[in-house]
Image (tube, rainbow, N blue to C red):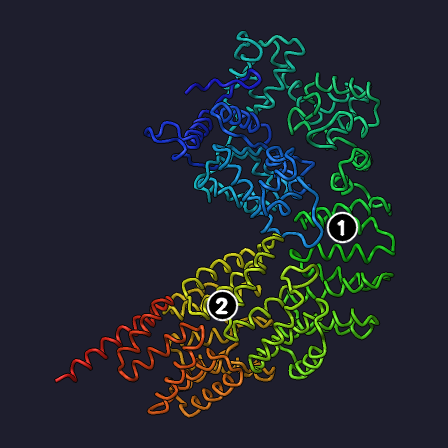
Amino acid sequence: MGQRVLRNRRTLYERESELVAVDEALAELTGLGTDGADPADRQRGALLAFAGRAGIGKTTLLAEVRRRAAAQGCTVLSARGGDQEQRVAFHVARQLLQPRLAGAPEAELRASLGSWYDIVGPALGLCAPTEGAPPDQQGLRDGLDWVLTHLAVRRAPMVLVLDDAHWADPESLGWLAAFAPRAEQLPLLVVVAYRPDELPEHADAFRGLPGRAGGRPHDLEPLSADAVAGLVRESLGDHADDAFCHESWAVTSGNPFEIVELTAKVHDRGLDPTEAGAPLLRDLAAAVKGSGLIARLERLGPSAVRFAWACAVLGTEIHPALAAAVAGLGHEEAADAADALRGARILTGAETLEFVHPLIATAVYRAIPPATRVALHGQAAWCVTDDGQGATAAARHLLETHPEGDAWVVRQLRAAAGENLRAGAPDAARRYLARALREPPPAKLRAAVLHELGSASLLTEPATTVNHLRAALQEPIAEPALRHHIVYRLSQVLAHSDRLAEASETLAREIRVTGDARVRLRMLSEQFMWDAFRADEPDHPSRSRRLTRLADRLQGRDLTERYIIGLRTWDAVQRGEPADVALHHAERALAGGLGWAEADRGFEVPVLVSLAFMYADRPDRTEELFAAGTADFERQGWRGAHLSFAYTLLGYVRYRRGRLAEAEELVRSGLRLAERVGPGTPAHWYALGTLIQTLIARGRTEEATRVAEDHSFREPFPAAVVFPDAQTVYGELLLARGLTEAAAAELSAAGRRLEPRGIRNPAWCPWQLHLARAEACDTPDRALTTALEAVARARQFGAPSAIGQALRTAADVSTGEARLRYLEESVTHLDGSPAAYELACSLVALGTELHDADHLRRGLKTAAQCGADGLAAEARAALTLAMERTQGATP
């Protein structure tokens, strides 16, 4: 392979191993030279990372990567992090993807991006953000994944090149760090370069990326004396003698950027590259960087200095007219300054300017006197606004200015925060609003800014959000609607932080002072909802009576009324009122519409109404509502906790229908999403509880135990009510492991917690059923009493699945004729229900009791269809014994 590759007529010295790695990766990517197979069938992506200090040649190497990739017919996406753009959300993602998508008509772009258009479009600057709730960060990353994957497949083979990754914005860097390991499954080569000692804190995931992707970063080393000699002679001529070349190496420490700049200075000065000129190299080298560079800049005159300062403040992709406006220079004066800076190898480009090297940009920026730098950022904010670039472009400059109580600054920062929040960049929005608060805003706007700041911090910093929103309530608020929105938001974040009592009390205080009847009803509906999820609610029966009286007189005219009726539905389910009553209220709640992604509303009530149908043995209706609700989430780009709940609860529905393999797959998907949200969250508890129940039903108790141990599924259980009830599931697991005494203690504790709250429906929480089995060994009489009480409660609710399951428990703790009678009735009820797994359990138990092969065969078939492998094995063993017994009794 030829190694003398020119860039601007210069050779890449001592980068042979890196170029070999590049060529090998490109060969695999393009599928060339692979045993005569179709290249498209052999394309394989990879990740290459190059690390090294400033000036070591990363940019030159990446330029060669781009050249070689283009020469082999690859589509090349390219981006570069910028020191001044680090806090501009999605700056790098836009550089990579926008050129491939922008310019197409909206209709074509919508057709290309499909349902992702409204989710990723604003982040990539392709369209304005839509009104309503923004996508969550996971949803946005999934959308960007889809866009890049789609491009990689459609325009294969593709090479993605990211230079100066240490300066990439957190949103882009987090996305790319998560996506890059997938390159191996795509016709995509990802090549990144960065300074390892300058990777920011938000790049922790990126720091270990090469190792996860199967290789280590290539560390670029300084050039040797021989390589420097070759580079010097290539630039200055073969007559450069050894002493001159060696001194060039010594004064630059083998740094390629400094060597190139040094030889340019030697050429400009007309210095003879011989031993006689070697003593002058140290001073020339000093002029290449730091104070020497600044002295060189200052010699160009004040106009050139001011123009360079303006360019350094603007960052990358600098438009000369804009730089002139920031510098306060006329057109001709700015043009002369740009020419002088190009001649001094400080700037390059014509229609768009950039610094010759990031080291020069950094040195110029840091040399600007602090007060002048602040003033230039302020001027840049005005100029980019006048240029029509929008509030976000201005806001990153306003972050660098001093607070002066300027209402225009506050207005721009709030507008930029709104744009970023709706585009899915809450961290950027939070930075802008925090700066607006320091400006400070006019007193009449302070509460609004605090509210916006709290909303921006909602998902990432709930404790901070609470502080901001409580502070907002202490401010004078002229608009009642704003105060109400602050209260709603505060109660929501308290509830989602497992502080349900505080959420309820916050609403209660506001209800007492709110004069608007409709607002008071909305707040009451929110309070009812959070109280319904409180495990420590002091007076559930009283709340239930008040909720019943209120819901029964409402007509469902608006969303608030339908939410209250929906909560009445759930209360009826938990209390074990007749299923027909619960379903009556469920249909009332749904009559006017009950979407899962309503603006400023939670999804809890629509989910509860949907589940009511499942408990009442109408799972098809539940699944229909879940399909519509999940589609709502995906349209909004809510693919974190929201989608985790949707998958988990749909898995729970499948579990109760006896479709255990499907249930396990769905719940594992929900658990993966929940783990991205974070351990200990309600989504995590829901997913773990359902997965453990499902594994027990499948006969995989040891695996269920490992899941519980690996995820600390034990006390302390969450303060919020989750389902399946976590403590009950834990007791069921102990029982499955044969730890009856510990199981009885745990299940009794669950009963003591739920009974005072009026939660009596064994269809919702079967703690009594498991407790009866746990008590059967040591206290059989008490076990039967417990089981029969559960049967009575199940009969009151009236769902055949609940009655059949409770009757089988009664049979398990009974003997003789009573046992047989309970089992026969259990099978009868379960035959009329959708609970296939429960039916299989009762059939196997009845067949075993009667030694009846027909019941056992049916039970075995049903268990196998459910995926209940442990029960199927039990049925086979019982069937073998029954057959042997029948054959032995035959004369």
Q: Residue at x 58, y 9 (%)?
A: 274
Quarter in which the C terminus is drawn? bottom left
Q: CA distance from mark 2 to mark 1?
A: 43 Å
Label 1, on which residue? Answer: 433
Circle 1: residue type: Leu
Circle 2: residue type: Val
Label 2, on which residue? Answer: 653
Q: Residue at x 51, y 27 (%)?
A: 65
Give the vertical position of 644 relative to 535 (above or below): above
Quarter in which the N terminus is drawn? top left
Query: How many other residues sit within 10 Å of disc 1, few (<14), some (14-19) or many (≥20)?
Result: many
Q: Is residue 51 visible?
A: no
Q: Is residue 434 left or right of residue 752?
A: right
Q: In the image shown, does 566 or 770 lie closer to the viewer?
A: 566
Query: How many other residues sit within 10 Å of disc 2, few (<14), some (14-19) or many (≥20)?
Result: many
Q: Is residue 17 visible?
A: yes
Q: Is residue 300 left or right of residue 216?
A: right
Q: Residue at x 74, y 17 (%)?
A: 339
The image position of residue 510, as x and y in percent, is 79, 71
The image position of residue 30, as x and y in percent, is 43, 30
The image position of residue 715, as x and y in percent, is 52, 72
Q: In the image shown, does 98 or 476 lie closer to the viewer?
A: 98
Q: In the image shown, does 587 or 702 lie closer to the viewer?
A: 587
Which of the two marks, 2 or 1, is nearer to us in this view?
Answer: 2
Element type where label 2 sits in the image? helix
The image position of residue 461, as x and y in percent, is 67, 57
Q: Is residue 566 left or right of residue 737?
A: right
Task: Determine whether label 2 and label 1 are within 8 Å by CB.
Answer: no
Return the disc, 2 or 1, that comes first in the chain's sequence.
Answer: 1
Give the vertical position of 22 relative to 720 (above or below): above
View extreme (left): residue: 891
